[in-house]
Amino acid sequence: MNNNVPTDSEVILGILNNSDAVLKKLYLAYYPMVLQLIINNSGTADDAKDIYQEAIIVLYNKVKGGEFELSSKLKTFIYSVCRRLWLKRLTQMSRYGGDIRDFEQFLPVEDDMEVHADRDIQFHKMESSLGLLGEPCKSIIEDFYIHDRSMQEICEKFGYTNADNAKTQKYKCLQRLKKLFFQQK
Amino acid sequence: MSTNLQLAEAIERYVNGEMTGDELARFEQYRKDNAEVDLKITEHKYFAGLLKQYRERVALEAKLNAIHDEIDVHALVEEMTVHPSGIVRMWRNHHSKISVAASIAMFVVVGAMFFTGYFTNKNQPHYQELRGEIGKLRTEVRDQKRGQNALAVEIRKRPKMTTPSNYKGSGLALSTNGYIVTNAHVVGGRFDSLYVQDASGSSYKAKLVYSEPLYDIAILKIIDKSFSELPALPYNFKRNKSEVGEEVYAIGYSEGDSPVFDKGYVSSINGYLSDSSEYRVSIPLNPGNSGGPLVNAKGSIIGIVSGKQTQVVGASYAKKSGYLYKALRNVPADSLSGKLTLNNKNTLAKLDPVKQYKKLQNYVFMVKVY
């Protein structure tokens, strides 16, 4: 177990530079804190994992969006976000008894939670749109847009006779994906 | 179709910033001229942004999962779990049931207290009014004072009246002309006749002039013809409150036919269950003391002994003398057959308690209720 806690500015810079090492340090540093919060408030280790990862995504988006100002400790921010997320989850499961056992100080993070909730909705919309898309469209779109494969590679993988055919197929697939996405509520 | 495809491809390249030079300039001009194209570009930009977000999140989640797999979660869970004690755990798991049970228990207890008169009646095990039963004394006195014939007449007159238990208490002269104060509970609600007996053993017939159950004060008047006026009262009744710690003594007929002297101090300015009309005094008092005076070191009457706490040794209660004044104001004028004014002069102040008692005992009466 790595007990090196990265400094807050180190984390911010690391996120901006897509540093995997810093991400790992960050993850290891605060996971126990979140685990403690969740399992002592009627959650499981898996719940803790979900909540913690969601919080790190919130932090990532905030930093990447250039909105993060170090007005509070990073630790406090992560704790506050996890706390909010877990309260929301408990309420959804109707297991929230009205009190939560706290282990750290926390801040109101309503604004961040709103931004995150919007993004989360879009993410899940996209996820289900891709699910509805069906093969081979799903793989083509994922390969091209998510895994950064070139049209040439896609052409070979799916056995298209030439790159133009592949492009046409990709175009159709993207149109369908857009349609599916925007049709969803 | 192919134009659409070409356009889409161009838009994608434009959005991705892959166009340069003349091509870029041409496309931007084309976009300006054509609103539909502009809309498509905006839409594609938006959607590409969403796709990018999706892709970033998927990538990040993959990384996080990889990191997470390296953590020994199980060991951490053990370490981080706060193990509450058995009682706390039981409370967490069953608090609703426990609460309901407690509410019911509470309800039952309060209900039982209500129906047994706990809230309305002071005459409960904890509080004992200090009037004494005098079963034996009754016959003796009747033999002495009235003789068999008189008794027979009385019984014939009121054949249905069952004689209630006979009680005795103490009383203190309020004035020289035969007014006596005692406790309302000594006299009670129903009685055949009232007698008072002085320290020398002489008994006089008395009547109830006024009873104030709220303050537990009753005023009697000696109506016996053999009664001659008392000498001037040597004591006064204190108007203001006494202090905690003040040395006081009580005189009362708790045993035998002569007044008993008991000494102690004021232990609280509030009485039983914080009753502000009473003092709590640390004096071991006994049945028969009720109605007797509580006297301070200067010989002023500060209260009328009214009861004791049965579970605490030596805790007794006395009505404050201030309430005696209040009760006296409530006495209807037409029920008074002679003047009733309280003495203000105190000639006991400089005497020691032995001498005070000697003088006072002549003014303390045994109240006998038949």
Image: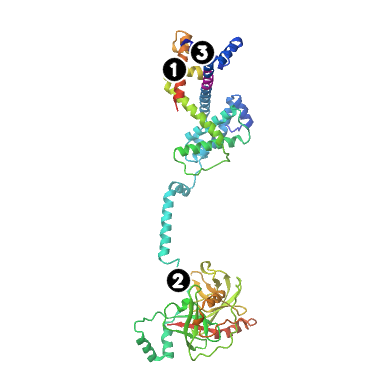
Which residue is the extreme one toward the right? B350
The image shows residue B352 at horizontal and vertical percentages of: 63, 82
Say which chain tag 3 marks: B
Identify which residue is drawn at 51% across, 30% down: A118
Identify which residue is drawn at 52% across, 73% down: B316
Magenta residue span:
B40-48
Label 2 neighbour load within 10 Å: few <14, some 14-19, many 20+: few
**In the rendered view, would you say B105 is above or below B156?**
above
The image shows residue B282 at horizontal and vertical percentages of: 55, 72
Residue B20 falls in image quadrant? top right
Q: Is residue B79 visible?
A: no
Give the main secondary structure, helix, strand or loop, of the magenta stretch.
helix
Say which chain tag 1 marks: A
Foreground label between 1 and 3 = 3
Q: Are marks 3 and 2 on the same chain?
A: yes
Helix or strand or loop: what does disc 3 sit on?
helix
Distance from disc 3 to disc 2, alpha carbons, whole Å, reads 102 Å
User: For the residue marked with disc 2, what is the amino acid?
Assistant: Asn
